[in-house]
Amino acid sequence: MDNKEEFLCINEESVEKVKAVFPPEEFLYDLAELFKIFGDTTRIRILYALFESELCVNDMAVLLGLSQTAVSHQLRVLKNNKLVRFRKEGKNVFYSLSDEHVRSIIEMGMEHVEE
Amino acid sequence: MDNKEEFLCINEESVEKVKAVFPPEEFLYDLAELFKIFGDTTRIRILYALFESELCVNDMAVLLGLSQTAVSHQLRVLKNNKLVRFRKEGKNVFYSLSDEHVRSIIEMGMEHVEE
DNA sequence: TTATCATATGAACAGATGAACATATGTTAT
DNA sequence: ATAACATATGTTCATCTGTTCATATGATAA
């Protein structure tokens, strides 16, 4: 079942063309990791909520009908990947989108979905 | 353990503001589904390969060092979600990106990763 | 027709992932 | 100090997902 018959390309030219510009594996890995973050309903809902206004954890939970724990866990993921930033104010932590890239990426996705 | 103390908002105003413009759940679900597709290394590599040139299944497998089966399975996902299209030519099936949205979304992601 | 090649599909297994629960940390008020 | 509150974290568990293996389909050539 050794199914790779050693580089039997059908169109060698195309393959070489692609190979020539292929980015480092790590880069594409990071790219996939980024999209993975957006690929969860809870996280997308959180990010979308932050489109309009910064919010504290409790308010997100209330707004989205989620447990505080669930929100906090997902915020950690978003924070670790620099998609949101936060400021502390007493007992509360207010989160907001970290930059315009986040907005752009989601908007691009929305265009595709809207069709 | 009933952890939702009935709408105890810290900032009622922000919550109302977000609620007012929140899109239907289904829309955000579809959006997450779309990003989920991009959130896998194999699929991103396939899509990226198709940036340069259309390719048949076997050539993708050779190029990316994957089994034919793995590529075929992922192409099905991409096909079902209309991210790639294909044309048959004899025994071969040539795949290509289905539209410019795909390219735009990936490019947006790359900008974020490049930082 | 049969043999061979290119791709697709189904089943099963391994690893990843999100949610819930319990608990910990950190902050303010008393 | 202690109590009450807001958020964070660790662990467990059920589910999802991607890969592999085996096999099927579909196409060309002999």
Image (tube, coloured by chain):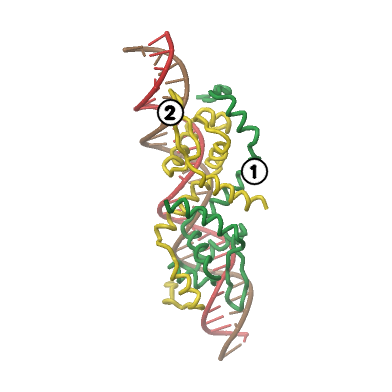
Chain colours: A yellow, B green, C red, D brown
The x, y position of residue B39, in whole percent, is: 50, 53
What's the residue type where badge 1 is placed? Glu
Disc 2 and disc 1: Cα gap in Å?
33 Å
Side of A42 relative to A73 (left or right): right
Element on which disc 2 rests: strand
Chain name for mark 2: A
Above or below for A79 versus C11:
above
Are discs 2 and 1 located on one and the same chain? no
At 44% from the left and 52% from the top, the residue drawn is B113
Q: Which residue is mark 1?
A: B26
Q: Does residue A110 sit above or below B13 in this rendering?
A: below
Location of residue D26 by image quarter: bottom right
Residue nearest the viewer, comparing D22 with D7: D7
| Residue A70 shows in this picture | no
**Disc 2 marks which residue?**
A88
Disc 2 vs disc 1: Cβ atoms closer than 8 Å? Answer: no
Q: Nearer the viewer, residue B107 or B42?
A: B107
Quick check: can you spot residue A38? yes
Seen at 43% across and 73% down, the residue is A4
In front of the other: A24 or B55:
A24
Element marked by disc 1: helix
Rendered location of residue A6, percent (x, y): 41, 76
* Neighbourhood count class around disc 1 (C-alpha, 10 Å): few under 14, some 14–19, many 20 upward: few
How crowded pointer 2 is (Cα within 10 Å; few <14, some 14-19, many 20+) is rated as few
**Number of numbered callouts drawn:** 2
Find residue C16 and report its horizontal and vertical position in percent.
43, 49
Disc 2 residue type (three-letter): Lys
B12 relative to B62 in the view: left or right = right
Residue B33 lies, in percent from the top left, at 58, 49
